Image (tube, helix red, strand yellow):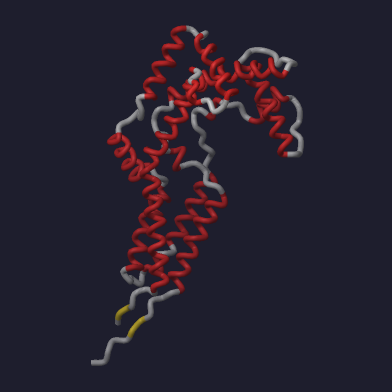
Amino acid sequence: MSHKPFPSSIKVLAIIQLCITFAVIIWSVSIPFVAERYALKAKLNLYKTIIGDPAIASNAEGAAKLERNKARFAALPQETQQAINEEFETYMRGSTSSAWSKVKDAIEIFLLKLPPFTRAWIALSLIVSLMILLGIPSARQAVWLLPLMTIFFAYFSLTKPDLSTFDETLYPSENEIVRLYLQEPLKPSVSEQREQLLKGWRIYLIKKWAHQEPAEDPAEQALQVEEGEFAFNIHLLKGAKVDRGLNYQLYYYNKESIFTLMAYILWNLIFALSVWLKKPPRVQPEPQ
């Protein structure tokens, strides 16, 4: 007794599943290249803002601010200027690691550092999809491992602590801004809260980094904010200098949104149910 292949509709779903799997593989492998490129661009912009590079100005007001930053940079101690310029030149020369190094990072991350449930899902997705395309009946049972893996992944994602980059830990929390600098309760309206937090952020820059009390005159206060922002950006350079390597955990181990996790589970459930309900028809052997 033999089995016919799965129906064409199920084969189409298997091909879609293979495409999704290969997309996950390509994204995982591309992380070292994309992440470093993004980080490099962000760090260069930070250095150019501090140095006062007019090339990044988008308007006359921005150009004037960068010109003032240039004067502030020139007023820094010579040792600090030299250290910042040397670090800036290093980043200007391009990528901080070779292409071969990033390829090795990609292979190592994909084989060893991906979350275990992600690796298990990729392997099972490839195997089950190929079983369906080859008409192997046991794919009907094996396919249920896919939604099972996504449920485990969702639980793992929702229960792990949030990860943050080194730079993010240098920013004050919302609670700190409200309690120490804004010193007034947040209003119910989201738009009003945004204005209040911006006000608190400006006070934070003035007091914490410009070491001044906020001026009453708006124009003078704007310059105080600039001075505080300049000092704060110098502080952020510590993060730029330390965080040179690729922290793969920030990309593979961060929490997914509940809607993304629901989409993962829903698609794999639909795929499993479709395969389960479409049992390959049996054919009787021809009489001899």
User: Residue 139 in the image: x percent, y percent?
Assistant: 37, 68
256 lies above or below 47 = below
Please say whether residue 232 is visible from this viewpoint: no
User: Residue 176 in the image: x percent, y percent?
Assistant: 66, 26
How many labels, in total? Answer: 0
Q: Is residue 222 left or right of residue 267?
A: right
Q: Is residue 224 left or right of residue 264?
A: right
9 lies above or below 151 = below
Q: On the rendered image, what quadrant is the N terminus found in? A: bottom left
The image quarter containing residue 183 is top right
Q: Residue furthest bottom?
A: 288
Q: On the rendered image, what quadrant is the C terminus found in? A: bottom left
Q: Residue at x 54, y 28 (%)?
A: 58
227 lies above or below 188 = above
The image quarter containing residue 66 is top right
Q: Residue at x 31, y 69 (%)?
A: 134
Q: Residue at x 47, y 22 (%)?
A: 48
Q: Is residue 184 left or right of residue 160?
A: right
Q: Residue furthest front?
A: 60
Q: Residue at x 64, y 13 (%)?
A: 211
User: Residue 241 in the image: x percent, y percent?
Assistant: 43, 22
User: Residue 236 in the image: x percent, y percent?
Assistant: 51, 22
Please say whether residue 131 is visible from this viewpoint: yes
